[in-house]
Image (spheres, rainbow, N blue to C red):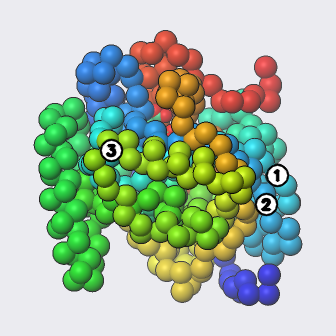
Amino acid sequence: MSSLPDIQPVVFSPEIEQTAPDEINTIAELVEVFLGMAHTVADYEGHAFRAVHAKGHALLRGKLTVREGLPAVYAQGLFAQPGEYEAIMRMSSPPAEQLSDQVSTPRAVALKLMRVPGERVPESRDHDTQDFLMVNGPVFTRPGPKEFLRDAKLLAATTEKAPEAKEVFSSVLRGAEKVIEALGGESETLKALGGEPATHPLGDTFYAQTPFLYGPYIAKFALAPVSPALTALTDQPLQSEDEDAQRHAISAFFHDRDGAPVEWELRVQLCTDLARMPVEDASVQWPEALSPFVAVASLVVPPQQSWLQGRSQVEEDELAFDPWHTVAAHRPLGAVNRARRVVLAASRQFRGAFNRCPIHEPKLRRA
Ligand code: HEM
C-alpha cells in the first residue's frame, strides 16, 4: 500500500448538500416523465420493464472481497474491515425500450452485495444489501435533475417511436462522435442519444458519477476491469447484425473461460476539495490529480451462464437495484441522488404492479 496517495479528505457536514427550492417539483415531474415512458413501453410490449435501463445483457454471480490493510481514510463503512460478499451484477443499456444493439448507447452495470452488516438508511431499513449503479463514463450528462428533466422529456417523446429510425440515427451519431473524437473531444450528449462507440462492455470502466458518504468522508465509486482477458476487450469494436450482440458476446466470454475467473477492482475517489469536486453538480469530473481512484475491493466472477433466455428475464423482473439500498455509511449525496430516491422507487412499483411480479431484495435480514 506504499503507493497510496497522501490526501486530506473533506469531512462531510450537512450544509454541503444544498437543496434547490423547487427540487421537489422537479422530482415530481421526473416521476411523471419516467412513468410515462414505462407506460408507453408496457402498452407496446404487454410487459413492464425498468423505466430506463430496460434491456438486460447479463446477470452474473460473483464475490466481492474487501482488501486487507487499507489506510485509515479508505477503510470506512463497508470497507472498514476485510470481508467477502456474494454479488449479483446486472449489465444493461440505458434506453427505456428493448432496442436492438445496433442502436449503440452507453453501457451500464448494477452491482448488489448481499448480507452487508451495519446501520441502514431509512429507505432500506429492512434489507441487508448494498447496491452500486454505474455507467461507462466518469460524469453525468447534466449538473442536476432540473437540467436532466429536459433530456428526459426529449427521450420520452421518442419512446417506442420507429425503432428502425433509431438504428439509422445511431449509426449517423456514431460517425459524428468519431469526427469529434478525431478532433480531440468527446460529446456526452451525442453518446447518450445513440452515438456511443459500439465496443465490448466487458472492457469498460464504469463510474457511479454521483457522490456518496464514505464513513465521515465523501467519495465517488468506479469499477475497472483488471484481468488481462477483460482489459484486452477495452475499446474492442462490437458491431454485427446481431440485435442482442452484447448479450451474446458476454455469454460467449463467460462460457469459454476454461474455468478461469476474471476480476474487476472497485475503486474509490475521496473528495479533497469541495470547489473542484462538487457534491451538487454531477457533471463535473473530479480531478484525479487532486485525489486518484484507489482500489478498495476486488470483484471476482467465475465462468457461468450469464443469460438464460426466459429465466433471466423473470429474474431481472424480480430484482431492483437502487443506490438507496445502502448502509448509512454510504448514503447517496447530491441532487441527482435525491431525485433517484423517488424516481427509482416509482419505476419499480409500476413494473411490479403491471407484471404482477413482486420485486424483492434477494435476502432479507428480518422476516
Ligand atoms: C436524476 C437522475 C436519474 C434518474 C431519474 C434515474 C432513473 C432511473 C430509473 C427510473 C431506473 C429504473 C429503476 C427500476 O425500475 O428498478 C434506473 C436504473 C438505472 N440507473 Fe438511473 N437514473 C438517474 C441517474 C443515474 C446515474 C447517475 C447512474 C449511474 C451513473 C444511473 C445508473 C442506472 C443503472 C445502472 C440502472 C439499471 C439498474 C438495474 O440494472 O436494475 N442512473 N435509473
Task: Find disc 1 in the rendering and name its residue.
Answer: 84
The type of residue carrying mark 3 is Asp
Q: In the rendered image, which quarter contains the C terminus?
A: top right
Q: Secondary structure at mark 1?
A: strand
Q: How far across and how far down the image is residue 318, in percent?
A: 56, 25
Which label was assigned to residue 66?
2
Q: Nearer the viewer, residue 189 or 346?
A: 189
Q: Are marks 2 and 1 in contact (CB under 8 Å)?
A: yes
Q: Is residue 15 visible?
A: no
Q: Secondary structure at mark 3?
A: loop
Q: Residue furthest top?
A: 356
Q: Which of pointers 3 and 1 indicates the residue nearer the eye?
A: 3
Task: Find disc 3 in the rendering and name its residue.
Answer: 242
Label 2 to label 3, Cα distance in Å?
A: 38 Å
Label 3 to label 1, Cα distance in Å?
A: 37 Å
Mark 3 or 1, nearer chain start: 1
